Amino acid sequence: MQPTLRHSDVVICVKSNKNIKRGDIIAFYNNDKILLKRVIGLPGDLVMIDQNGTVIINGDTLQENYVSALSLEPCDKELPVYVPENSYFVLGDQRITSMDSRSEMIGMISEDRIIGEAKLRVWPLDKISSIEKTEGGA
C-alpha cells in the first residue's frame, strides 16, 4: 500500500461491511494472511484497466492521486469484469508489484473475508495519524 502505508505500519481497523466506499482501505483475509488494499470496484460496478494501467469504472476514468505508478500487470484476469453482489474489487497503491483483484490468487473480496476498514495508523509513533479515505473520482 505504499506510499500510503508501509509494510511495518500498525493500523487499527473498524469492522463494518455496510459503509464500504470506493477509495477506502480495507483489511481482509487471504488464506492465512491479512492484506490491506484499496477498494476500487463496488458491487455491480464494471471495472476495466487499460494497457497503461488507467482504471475505468462504469465507463468513467478513476482519478487516482494516491498511486505511485499505474500498471495493468500483474494481471491474469480477463477484463473488463463485473463486481458481484456482496463483493469488492481491490487494488494496491503500488500497482507494479501489488497482488490484488487483478490476480486469480486474490480475486474479488467477498464481505465474509473483510476484517474492517483501516482507520488509524498507530505505529511508528512519529507517524500516528488517521488514514484518510482518498476519493477516487469516477
Image (cartoon, rainbow, N blue to C red):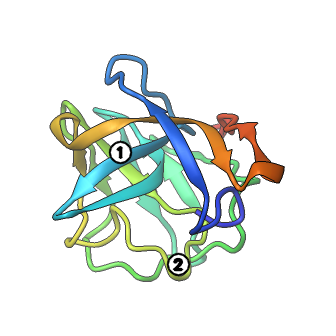
Task: Tell me if mark 2 has few (under 14), some (14-19) or many (20+) residues whose alpha carbon lies within 10 angstroms of its own.
Answer: few
- Of 99 and 85, the residue lying toward us: 99
- Amino acid type of the residue tagged 2 in the rendering: Gln
| Disc nearer the start of the sequence (1/2) | 1
Element at badge 1? strand
User: Measured from the top left, where is residue 121 in percent x and y?
Assistant: 65, 44
Quarter holding residue 45? top left
Element at badge 2? loop
Above or below, comparing residue 17 to residue 1 in the picture = above
Would you name the residue on which mark 2 appears?
A: 51
Q: Which mark is residue 118?
A: none
In the picture, the quarter occupied by the N terminus is: bottom right
Report the residue at 39% width, 46% height from top: 27
Q: Which residue ends up furthest to the top in the rendered image? A: 18
Report the residue at 52% width, 52% height from top: 56
Task: Tell me if mark 1 has few (under 14), some (14-19) or many (20+) residues whose alpha carbon lies within 10 angstroms of its own.
Answer: some
Would you name the residue on which mark 1 appears?
A: 46
- Amino acid type of the residue tagged 1 in the rendering: Leu
- Of 104 and 1, the residue lying toward us: 1
Above or below, comparing residue 122 to residue 10 in the picture = above
User: Measured from the top left, where is residue 70 in percent x and y?
Assistant: 64, 72
Report the residue at 55% width, 81% height from top: 96
Quarter holding residue 41? top left
Report the residue at 20% width, 31% height from top: 86
